[in-house]
Image: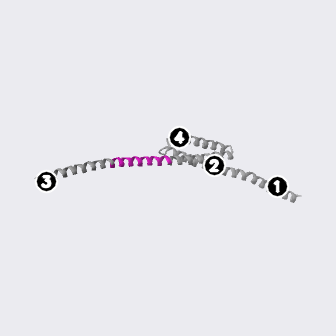
């Protein structure tokens, strides 16, 4: 009988161990998933801070605020273990951040293009002025040549 109890005890321990493993593994996986989301939220928050510090960020304030709001809500949802909501919010934030980066890059390119266009217009204006000066000098030269040849003929 004691041998039977010993076997039952071993079986009980094995079943208990398997049961605990089944309980612990999902919670470990959930903890890993939550940590992964927290890290992603942190990375996106750093990106928001970086974008706010960029040159033309003032024009994107509303979009940056909306993105920050989504990231804050995603963090709340991680705490509630609502991972489908977290995924959706992070996807929105990712797309919005990409959009903001592209808009800021476009804005910088437009500013450079405007500066080049202004520079070109300045050069074009200066070329027109120089052309007029050249025409005036050519006319003066012709006048002086006529005066010199008139004096030479008059002698």
1 or 2: mark nearer the eye: 2
Q: In the rendered structure, which disc, 3 or 2, sits on the residue that comes first in sequence?
A: 2
Q: In the rendered structure, which disc, 4 or 3, sits on the residue that comes first in sequence?
A: 4
Q: Which secondary structure, mark 1?
A: helix
Name the one closer to the observer, 132 or 55.
132
Instruction: Verify CB contact (< 8 Å) between mark 1 and mark 4.
Output: no
The residue labelled by disc 1 is 12
Q: In the rendered structure, which disc, 1 or 4, sits on the residue that comes first in sequence?
A: 1
The residue labelled by disc 2 is 37
Return the x and y of residue 48 as percentages of the image width and height. 54, 45
The residue labelled by disc 4 is 61
1 or 4: mark nearer the eye: 4
3 or 1: mark nearer the eye: 3
Residue at the image position 48 percent from the left and 44 percent from the top: 56
Numbered range of the magenta stretch: 106-127
Q: Which secondary structure, mark 2?
A: helix
Return the x and y of residue 117 as percentages of the image width and height. 41, 48
Q: Does the magenta stretch include residue 114?
A: yes
């Amino acid at each position: 009988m004691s041998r039977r109890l010993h076997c039952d005890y071993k079986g009980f321990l094995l079943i208990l161990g398997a049961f605990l493993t089944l309980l612990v593994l999902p919670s470990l996986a959930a903890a890993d998933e939550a940590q992964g989301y927290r890290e992603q939220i942190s990375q996106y928050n750093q990106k928001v801070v970086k974008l706010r510090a960029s040159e033309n960020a003032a024009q994107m304030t509303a979009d940056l605020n909306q993105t920050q709001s989504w990231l804050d809500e995603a963090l709340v949802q991680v705490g509630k273990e609502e991972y489908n909501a977290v995924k959706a919010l992070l996807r929105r934030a990712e797309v919005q951040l990409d959009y903001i980066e592209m808009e800021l890059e476009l804005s910088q390119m437009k500013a450079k293009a405007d500066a080049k266009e202004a520079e070109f217009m300045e050069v074009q204006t200066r070329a027109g002025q120089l052309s007029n000066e050249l025409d005036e000098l050519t006319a003066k030269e012709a006048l002086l040549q006529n005066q010199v040849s008139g004096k030479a003929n008059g002698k």
